Image: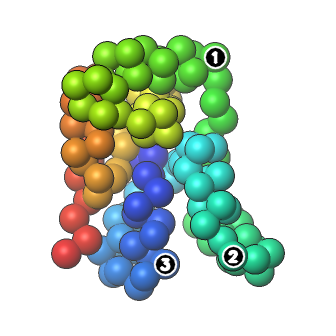
Amino acid sequence: MVFDTDVFIWVQRGNDKAAEIIDNADQRFLSIFTYMELLQCAKNKAQHKVVKDFLSELNFIVLPITENIGHRASIYIEEYTLSSHLRAGDAVVAATAVENNQPLVSGNTKHFRPIKDLRLKAFNPG
């Protein structure tokens, strides 16, 4: 499964459901874009280390942006930005999941719902 940034944020907030969905995943992936967002939110190098250690301890694999992912993301932007306000980062994350034949876990389903070829697994933190 590919995990969206919001799931990691919920884990940081101590949400048991977010921790459980990660714990129960056979394979754990995240887009390089999500990885960059997690590091960008850190306030110092110690928080960078916390993010890196968390991902390492749980055997997350960071998936790079490939030519196919970039191409698919640009198609998503063309198809969905005007009608659904799809943002570039979300297009990259969705394209990463699709190109790697993985479902995407996200609590922000409204961001991804319009993308027809995406297998979206809705996460509800409540």
Q: Name the residue at 42% across, 36% down.
A: 87
Q: Does the residue at mark 2 contact the one at mark 3 (Cβ under 8 Å)?
A: no
Q: Position of residue 84 (x, y in %)?
A: 24, 31
| Residue furthest out toward the right | 45
Above or below: residue 117 compared with residue 41 = above
Query: Which element carries disc 1, helix, strand or loop?
Result: helix
Q: Position of residue 18 (x, y in %)?
A: 36, 70
- Amino acid type at mark 1: Glu
Q: Which residue in the protein does label 2 denote?
A: 43
- Amino acid type at mark 2: Lys
- Kindly tell me whether residue 72 is visible in this rendering: yes
In the rendered structure, the answer to whether residue 41 lies left or right of residue 100 reads right
Which of the two discs, 2 and 3, labels the residue nearer the N terminus?
A: 3
In the rendered structure, the answer to whether residue 94 lies left or right of residue 121 reads right
Q: Position of residue 55 (x, y in %)?
A: 63, 64
Which of the two discs, 1 and 2, labels the residue nearer the N terminus?
A: 2
Q: Which residue in the protein does label 3 denote?
A: 12
Which of the two discs, 1 and 3, labels the residue nearer the N terminus?
A: 3
Distance CA(mark 1)–CA(mark 3):
32 Å
Above or below: residue 79 compared with residue 57 = above
Of labels 2 and 3, the one closer to you = 2
